[in-house]
Amino acid sequence: MNLTGADNYRMLEAKGAGNYVGCFLNVDNLCGGWYGEGDDMIFVDGDAFPPRYHGTGTEEVFGGGACPDRAYCGPYTGFHMVSNPDWSGKQSMYRFHVLDPVCFHERIEVGVEHGHANDLANDYSSTAFWYQHEPHAEFPPLPAAKERLPRFPEEFWRAYELWTGAHRLRTERGWPEGMSAGDRQSARAAQTRFLEAFFAGKWEEAQAAAEGLKTMVDAAARGGTR
């Protein structure tokens, strides 16, 4: 159980007086399966647990009850990016508190569990919007660029390394002379399969396509170069 909110993904921490008006939340679903059972929690003016606002699941915050598996956009809520019907890969959603601003007088903390009681380890990023009177708390330093890169599972790196190896050989030698027209067509199809799977976050499919491409290019390269 999560009875403090301490390990929630935090979208906003502000001190002073103002109102929270919304956010974009991005989830790169590395764990697979439904990711959105995390409750939203908004602590206002030093709330102890439970917070002033305590939701029942991530999808409800953004207007998408019952595990939305396709993109949609409304005036104030929406899931404008849903990569796959099985919820794998990248998701992006928004909620604007235009008609229901969340006011605070001293401080506010806006967060959401990553999975039920924070039992998942997906990659989250967000942008929060709020108004407040001056003075405001000093913003924390921006992490180095390397620390802001997306997290990727091991399957990503295996697929990426296979692809770069095959692509490097293909770039250096062109399509090897030992590759027939039919093999070149198969290699181009493998490239297409890799790119489609890779950018959809389907790492195992991408890895299989990259392995097939590398095998074809390696075999042709042993038979001749151009």
Image (cartoon, rainbow, N blue to C red):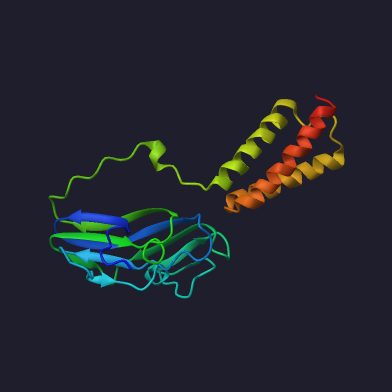
Residue 216: name its quadrant.
top right
Q: Position of residue 144 (x, y in %)?
A: 35, 36
Quadrant housing the C terminus: top right
- Residue at point 46% right, 46% down? 151
Q: Residue furthest top?
A: 226
Q: Nearer the viewer, residue 215 or 61?
A: 215
Residue 131 horizontal/vertical position (percent): 22, 57
Q: Please give left or right for residue 169 compared with residue 222 in the image.
A: left
Where residue 60 sits, quadrant-wise, is bottom left
Residue under the image location 29 percent in, 71 percent down:
54
Task: Judge by depth and name the residue closer to the eye, 6 or 89.
Answer: 6
Please say if 61 is above or below 168: below
Horizontally, residue 96 falls left or right of residue 84, namely: left
User: Residue 155 appears at what percent x and percent y?
Assistant: 58, 47
Q: Quadrant of the N terminus?
A: bottom left
Task: Look at the picture and state if 46 lies above or below 203.
Answer: below
Total labels: the figure holds 0
